[in-house]
Image (cartoon, rainbow, N blue to C red):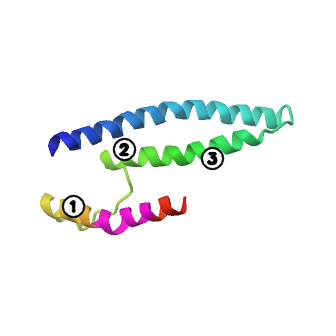
Amino acid sequence: MGAIIRFINGISEWTAKIAMWALCIVTMIVVLEVLTRRVFHSPHVWTYEIITFFYGAHFMLLSAYALLKKGHVAIDILYNNLKPKTQAVLDVVSYVIFFFPFMIVLFSMG
């Protein structure tokens, strides 16, 4: 089980590094769009679409990394006072109740 968890964590680290570097490319596209719109008065439709799609993918790719590094926003008033085993059970239950139904709706509607 530990090998599977390390493998999945490695995938999260790897995709996060790719997404972080790809953000530099999107930043250049945003700068290009601002220059062409403001200086040359010639906006492009494709840049807006690429930026929108990339930020959606960026959010999805880095959400696993944020969970891995515990970088998400949480109010841990009760959670920090629990035993580690109870915290793990609470994590599993909350993912089953909130995360997976949301992902099912997202994939079915998307």
Q: Quadrant of the C terminus?
A: bottom right
Q: Which region is colored magenta?
A: 94-104
Question: Can you say whether 62 is above or below 31 in the image?
Answer: below
Say which residue label 2 marks: 65
Do the residues bearing badges 3 and 2 touch, measured as CB atoms within 8 Å?
A: no
Determine the residue positioned at 33% across, 69% down: 97
In this view, the residue farthest toward the front is 108
48 or 30: nearer the eye?
48
Query: Sequence order check: which comes first, mark 3 or mark 2?
Result: 3
Cα–Cα span, label 3 and label 1: 37 Å
Question: Can you say whether 39 is above or below 76 in the image?
Answer: above
Q: Is residue 46 magenta?
A: no
Disc number for residue 29: none
Mark 2 residue crowding within 10 angstroms, few (<14) / some (14–19) / many (20+) = many
Quadrant of residue 34 in the image?
Answer: top right
Cα–Cα span, label 3 and label 2: 21 Å
Left or right for 43, reference 63: right
9 or 109: nearer the eye?
109
Location of residue 106 in the rendering, given as x and y in whole percent from the top left corner: 49, 61
